[in-house]
Image: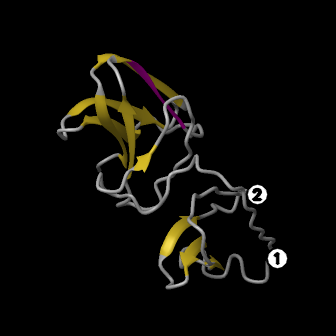
Amino acid sequence: MFYIQNQDGKVLQYMSSDGNVDKKSTKVGLPAGTYILRVKNTDYCKNLYINVPYQISANFTKSELYEKEFNDNNDEPNKISLGSQYFGRLSSRDDQDFYLFVLNSKGNVEIRFNHNKLSGVTDALWNVNIINSTGKTINTIKSNGNEDKKVLILKNLPKGSYFIQVTKKQC
């Protein structure tokens, strides 16, 4: 297991490998600060990776086009500009991400949700809810592992503020 932790040891992101992956990487949006990269053998693998060399590196790209943790409620959404693509990732079972966009006039809005294709996974993994300023869900995109691109067109959307909520499938 690979963890990204803050200075207090709180896990912000994690990633595991099934042993069949030569290279694995992750991107995460983090505010300025100091972070700990932690590699830990899992109980499942016990002695499998002992004495097996590995390489690790961290790169930085300054960008405002990512989901900023921790925004697990609509009190602190990521404000986004229409026409720009943002990058996000649900980092735990309880994680949910909120974005906010504002329409200055009535019009059509196209919401695109893309992810890496997960072959053989036909269950819905993500729910992308479009929520108006009163808290009412006006539409939902359900995306499964095989569908790496989903598009929703909202026609004649009234002027106002709207939230996009990304959640995991509720099991």
Q: Residue 109: within the magenta? A: yes
Q: Badges 1 and 2: C-beta atoms under 8 Å apart?
A: no
Q: Identify residue type, mark 1.
A: Pro
Location of residue 143 in the rendering, given as x and y in whole percent from the top left corner = 43, 34
Judged by its main secondary structure, the magenta piece is: strand
Label 2 sits on a secondary structure element that is loop
Location of residue 112 in the rendering, given as x and y in whole percent from the top left corner = 49, 29
Quick check: 35 above or below 161?
below
Which residue is identified by label 1? 53
Quick check: 123 above or below 32?
above
Most foreground residue, 116 or 113 = 113
Q: How is the image coloured?
A: secondary structure
Residue 1 seen in the current view: no
Could you say which disc has been placed on residue 23 in the image?
Answer: 2
Most foreground residue, 145 or 100 = 100
Q: Which residues are magenta?
A: 108-114
Image quadrant occupied by the N terminus = bottom right
